[in-house]
Amino acid sequence: MVYRVEEVARALRVGRTKVFDLIRAGELPSVKIGGSRRVPAQSVEEYLSRLISEAA
């Protein structure tokens, strides 16, 4: 399962620009499918897990 950047932004309650910043920084791995950037569901889950671990 992959998500559009807009869907990830909505789920994380951040802007599209923030999601692209996370992708550029390597914190949120993504793939290109055709001309579109997609974020695998596993990448979102791992990112959230890291945030939770760091907060603890």
Image: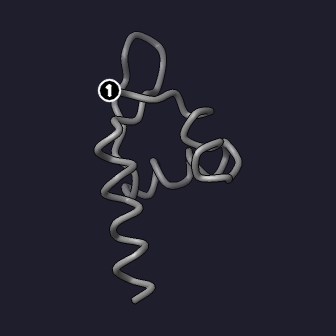
Q: Residue shown at 68%/53% (left/top)?
A: 14
Instruction: From the top left corner, tell me how far across and down residue 56 is, in percent.
Output: 39, 89
Relative height, residue 7 to residue 12 (above, below): above
Instruction: From the top left corner, tell me how far across and down residue 30 is, in percent.
Output: 36, 37
Q: State the image quarter where residue 16 is shown.
A: top right
**Image side of residue 20 versus residue 38, left or right:** right
**Image side of residue 6 versus residue 35, left or right:** right
Q: Residue shown at 46%/26% (left/top)?
A: 37
Q: State the image quarter where residue 26 is shown.
A: bottom left
Residue most toward the bottom?
56
Label 1 CA crowd tier, 10 Å (few <14, some 14–19, many 20+): few
Q: Residue shown at 56%/45% (left/top)?
A: 20
Relative height, residue 10 to residue 36 (above, below): below
Residue at image mark 1: 1
Observer-nearest of 11 and 19:
11
Instruction: From the top left corner, tell me how far across and down residue 39 is, in percent.
Output: 40, 35
SS class, disc 1:
loop
Residue most toward the right?
15
